[in-house]
Image (cartoon, grey):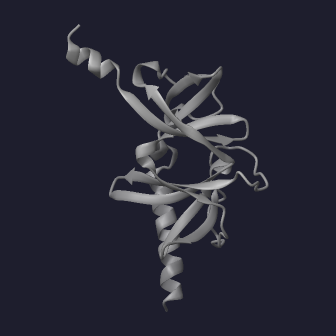
Amino acid sequence: MTLEQTEVKNVIRQFLTFRLMYELFAIDVIKVIEILEMTKITKVPKSPDFLLGVINLRGNVLPVIDARIKFGMPKKELTLDSCIIVISIEVEDGTVTLGALVDAVSEVLEVNENTIQEPPSIGSRYNSEFMEGLVKINEEFVMILKIGKAFSTDEVDDLNLLLDSKSSKKHQ
């Protein structure tokens, strides 16, 4: 094995981990813009169940989704640990920024890429299409998400249309 091949196998990646119920999830830190404390969220009428509403982020409208609902978990009362992860999602025609309400942010993990296991094809409560893989940290499995796959292009387009129609009505 050449030095070049060894370097490829020892790629270290960083992931932000967060909790939803008792599960630990992770997303690539490259996708994370910032983490916000809970703030007032303005409801958007006739929006999908998983869309909590919008917040003002430095003059921009930021849609906020409830990650629990998006992943088929029960809704939960907010706690001091509840926060919004602002993430950037690549879609067909560009990049979309949205907030994801999570129960708690845990830490940034550095993971050797060759320790990431394939997502299970059966027995998983979550769509394996959303998962890049699993990694075991301190006797606990962390589900690494493909955050762009967790939101279909249609869902992102629907959110954009919904938000655009609301903002254009305000200006009329």
Residue 75, image x, y percentages: 75, 51
Q: From what the image shows, is residue 162 above or below residue 1? A: below
Total number of numbered discs in the rendering:
0
Q: Residue at x 68, y 42 (%)?
A: 20
Left or right relative to 30: residue 128: right
User: Where in the figure is residue 33, as x and y percent of width and height?
Assistant: 45, 55
Q: Residue at x 54, y 26 (%)?
A: 134
Residue with the most extreme right position:
77
Q: Quadrant of the N terminus?
A: top left
Q: Quadrant of residue 138?
A: top right
Q: Position of residue 42 (x, y in %)?
A: 65, 73
Q: Is residue 139 above or below residue 148?
A: above
Residue that lies at the very extreme toward the bottom in this rendered image: 172
Residue 46: name its quadrant.
bottom right
Apparent side of residue 64 relative to residue 77 in the rendered image (left or right): left
Image height of 50 relative to 110, above or below: below
* Residue 163 spot, x, y in % from top left: 51, 72
In this picture, residue 129 sits left or right of residue 65: left
Q: At 73% across and 40% down in the image, what residue appears?
A: 21
